[in-house]
């Protein structure tokens, strides 16, 4: 992987976007950045600098300033994602004196359970 610095003449934002789109479409390009004040484009990737300059020369003036190998930076470890804790399951215990179904008792709340109630 290498870092290629090119001198380019990009006069406006539209030409800059077109140049970046052209270079980023080349296979092997990892990143592209442009400094409009200094008229420099930096391309990082495993590509041939002559191919990059040739593609840019179709749009405007382009000249190779430097080609340097990129030092691999140690990757930052991502924090581990904690799994949500599940509530502990309480085992169901059968007690012989408990019936398998609950007893239901229906008790009227009103004094006249047959009467009609409108809420």
Image: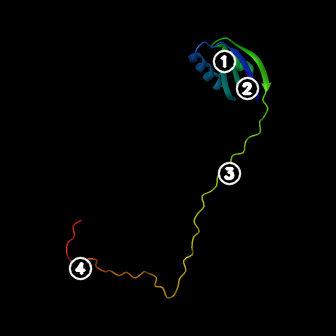
Image coordinates for residue 35, horizontal then vertical, percent: 66, 19
Q: Which mark lies nearer to you, 4 or 3?
A: 4
Label of residue 55 in the image: 1
Lower sequence index among marks 3 and 1:
1
Label of residue 1 in the image: none
Residue under pointer 2:
47
Position of the C terminus by quadrant: bottom left
Looking at the rendered structure, the number of numbered marks drawn on it comes to: 4
Between marks 4 and 1, how big is the CA–CA gap?
Answer: 93 Å
- Residue 78 higher or lower than 95, as above or below: above
SS under mark 4: loop
- 10 Å neighbourhood of mark 4: few (<14), some, or many (≥20)? few
Image coordinates for residue 118, horizontal then vertical, percent: 21, 67
SS under mark 2: loop
Lower sequence index among marks 2 and 1:
2
Between marks 4 and 2, how big is the CA–CA gap?
Answer: 91 Å
> For residue 8, what is the image quadrant?
top right
Q: Residue at x 46, y 85 (%)?
A: 99
> For residue 82, what is the image quadrant?
bottom right
Residue under pointer 3:
80
Lower sequence index among marks 4 and 3:
3
Q: Is residue 116 left or right of residue 57?
A: left
Residue at the front extreme of this rendering? 111
Q: Is residue 105 left or right of residue 92?
A: left
- 10 Å neighbourhood of mark 1: few (<14), some, or many (≥20)? some
The answer to whether one can see residue 27 in this image is no
Q: Residue at x 59, y 20 (%)?
A: 17
Lower sequence index among marks 4 and 1:
1
């Amino acid at each position: 992987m290498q870092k290629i610095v090119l001198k380019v003449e990009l006069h406006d934002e539209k030409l800059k976007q077109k140049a970046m789109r052209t270079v980023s479409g080349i296979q092997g390009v990892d990143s592209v950045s442009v400094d409009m004040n200094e008229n420099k484009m930096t391309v990082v990737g495993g590509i041939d600098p002559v191919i990059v300059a040739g593609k840019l020369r179709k749009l405007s003036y382009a000249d190779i300033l430097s080609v340097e190998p990129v030092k691999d930076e140690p990757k930052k470890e991502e924090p581990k994602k904690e799994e949500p804790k599940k509530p502990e399951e309480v085992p169901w215990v059968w007690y012989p004196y408990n019936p398998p179904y609950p007893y239901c008792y229906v008790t009227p709340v009103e004094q006249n359970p047959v009467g009609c109630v409108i809420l």
